[in-house]
Each structure stands twice: as structure tokens, then as C-alpha cells.
Amino acid sequence: MKVSDIINSLDLELLCGQSGIENEITGGYVSDLLSDVMGNAKEGQVWITLQTHKNVMAIASLKDLAAVILVKGFNPDEDTVKQSNQEGVPILRAKENTFEIAGKLFQLL
Amino acid sequence: MHFEFEIEAGDFSKLGFASSQLKTILKQLLGDHKVIRRVVVALYESEVNVVAHAYSGKVIIDINTEKIEIEIDDKGPGIEDIQLAMEEGYSTASEKVREMGFGAGMGLANIKNNSDEFYISSEVGVGTNLKIIAYLK
């Protein structure tokens, strides 16, 4: 499954990092602790979080994650958007909270 | 090959610069090698520690055909009890740092888990020195 597939299936809003929408998805990871993601997320996973600052993109890029989903309609910071575009790691916005969107993504994968 | 980077303490907007540079360099040298993600994670966590706790820091990287050696040397408050600091969940990070999702007390353990050899020494009131070695095999 690709990032573009979950955008359609889960009705997510693509905010930035368009060049990565063909990234292949291997799974998902849910955490708002950056060290936890750094230590435990795996390449190709979609990361669901409420953190909006730039360091989210540094981690997503260093770990080769497929995409980041921001929950509850949150907005990424301006420099977060910039880095998402540079690194080609898409940020997708969900209206749902973490529990709901994680459940839907789990079902889909 | 030898590289050096400065780390600006307290500035979370520049956090990850050295690890991002290292990733680019290693990808050019090694292609898609599994050691890359490990050392990049170890260096990123070390950068977090310097930015969150120290006054200034320096990263020194040496790469040869056998191994990658990274030294992170900071001027800062130092660590009083290294054994305690190594325990997962123990942290002295500020509230501001925690709000960003750092300071969960997993950093040093992450660094150790992503190294083949890991050395830490610290002097209270002076600073902390980390050495990370990963073998290419």
C-alpha cells in the first residue's frame, strides 16, 4: 500500500511533502514521545502524532518513515512544512483523534 | 574520513543537523547499509542531549573501511550518576523539553542499543563525553 492509497481510503488531507506520496507503507507507529519513535519505529511506517514542531520531520526523515499523520486537525509549524517538502516525507492531516485514526489505519493495513 | 560539527545548545530548531549530514555522507559512501540508521539514531539522540542539557558541544566523526567512530563532547553540567542516567525512564529534562516530546529518559539507552561499542564519561560541572563505535563488518 502506498501513501496515496491511505490518503484516499482514510480521507486524509495532504498538507506537504507531495513528492513522497508514492512511498510504500510497511506499517504504522503511534507515539508522541520522539525518543520512543527514534528507538522503535521502523522504516516505511506511518507515524501518527499530535506533535507539530520541526523535529518530527528530522526523525521521520532519519528513520525513513513513509509519512506522518497529524491528528485532530492540527497544523504543522511553518518550518515543519518546509522540511517535509525538502525531505519528501508527506504530512497528512486527520480530523479524527489518535485512537480513531490509528484504528482505521490498522484495519486498512 | 574526518568530520567535525558544532552543536548549539538550547536551540531545538537546529537539532539534527549533524545526524542529517552523517546520513548523507554515509549513503554516498556505503549505499543502502543497515549500519546507517543505527549510527544516525545514536548521533541524533546525542545531539538531543547536548541541546537539552549542555552549554555547547562538538561532534567528531571518523570513518574508515572497518568502522564508524563518533565522539560527542560537551561543556555542561555533567552527569552525577551515570548508571542512573542510563536507566530507561530516568530524566532530568525541563518541562519545556518534555512538552516537545523529548526528555522521556530513553536517549542514552537508545544510543547504547544502536552502537557496537559505547563509552560514556562525565565530570560534574565540566561536561560529558560519549564515544560511539559501529562496525561495518
Image (cartoon, coloured by chain):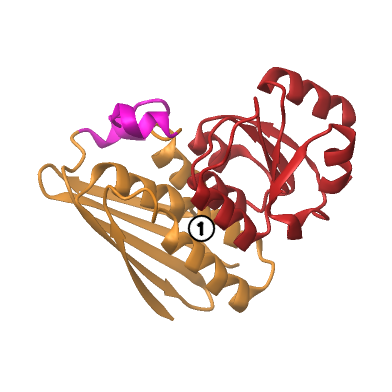
Chain colours: A red, B orange
Outermost residue to the top? A99
Q: Amino acid at mark 1?
A: Val
Query: Is residue B87 visible to the viewer in this orientation of the structure?
Result: no
Residue neighbourhood size for the residue with mark 1, other residues' Cα within 10 Å, grouped as few (<14), some (14–19), many (≥20): many
Q: Give the residue at x 51% y 57%.
A: B40
The reply to whether the magenta stretch includes residue B63 is no
Relative to B128, is A7 on the left or the right? right
Read off the chain for label 1. B
Q: Is residue B3 above or below residue A84?
A: below
Quarter location, residue A109: top right
Position in image of residue B48 (x %, y %): 38, 46
Q: Is residue A96 above or below residue B61?
A: above
Which of these two is toward me, A14 or A68? A14
Q: Give the residue at x 84% y 31%.
A: A10
Position in image of residue B41 (x %, y %): 51, 51
Quadrant (top left/top right/bottom left/bottom right) for the N terminus of chain A: top right
Q: Give the residue at x 75% y 19%.
A: A100
SS state under label 1: helix
Q: Give the residue at x 83% y 55%.
A: A22
The reply to whether the magenta stretch includes residue B92 is yes
Relative to B78, is B99 on the left or the right? right
Which of these two is toward me, A76 or A101? A76
Which of these two is toward me, B108 or B75? B75
Q: Which residue is mark 1?
A: B39
Position in image of residue B125 (x %, y %): 10, 44
Relative to B108, is A49 on the left or the right? right
Position in image of residue A51 (x %, y %): 53, 34
Which span of residues is magenta-colored? B81-100
